[in-house]
Amino acid sequence: MKLKYKGSKGYLTAVQHTTVIDWLKQKNYWHLDELKTYLEDSFGVVSESNQSYYELFKQNISWNKTQKKNPNKNPDLVAKKKLEITAWLDTHQREIVSGELVVFFEDECHLL
């Protein structure tokens, strides 16, 4: 069986597509509404489905850019939380050693 359907033609030309990908790569964060507005204002393209926009996000870029340092890090809050956790662990030392209590740890990012 041979299918003659080849899909619909894309709304963006190859040059426009490259321009959009380059624009996305320059941004620190990506928002769906911002991409929609950019495509409509720059190229007059509006897709019926969000899937078209998601496909643009997926191509050669990551949705989330990593950061070397936590921008919300507050050393005073971290020290306060560390003291709080240490005090709690000291209070429950007997149950922890006996195996009655299991303790899971959180990393610094999740403390705040």
Image (cartoon, rainbow, N blue to C red):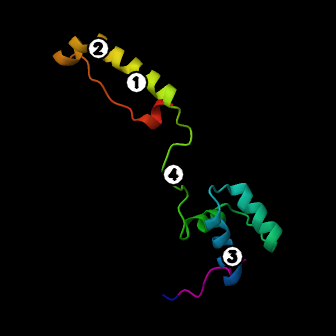
Residue wearing tag 4: 67
Which secondary structure type mostly characterizes the magenta part of the structure?
Answer: loop
Observer-side mark, 2 or 3, equals: 2
The location of residue 90, given as percent across then percent down, is 29, 14
Residues 77 and 11: in front is 77
Residue wearing tag 1: 82
Residue wearing tag 3: 19
Q: Amino acid at mark 1?
A: Lys
The first of marks 2 and 3 along the sequence is: 3
Look at the image and tell me whether residue 91 can be seen: yes
The first of marks 4 and 2 along the sequence is: 4
Query: What SS does tag 4 mark?
Result: loop
Q: Amino acid at mark 2?
A: Asp
> At x 73% / y 64%, what residue is drawn?
48
Query: What SS does tag 3 mark?
Result: helix
Region rendered in magenta: 3-12
Circles 2 and 3 in contact, beta carbons < 8 Å: no
Q: Is residue 6 magenta?
A: yes
Tell whether 103 sits left or right of 81: left
Residue wearing tag 2: 90
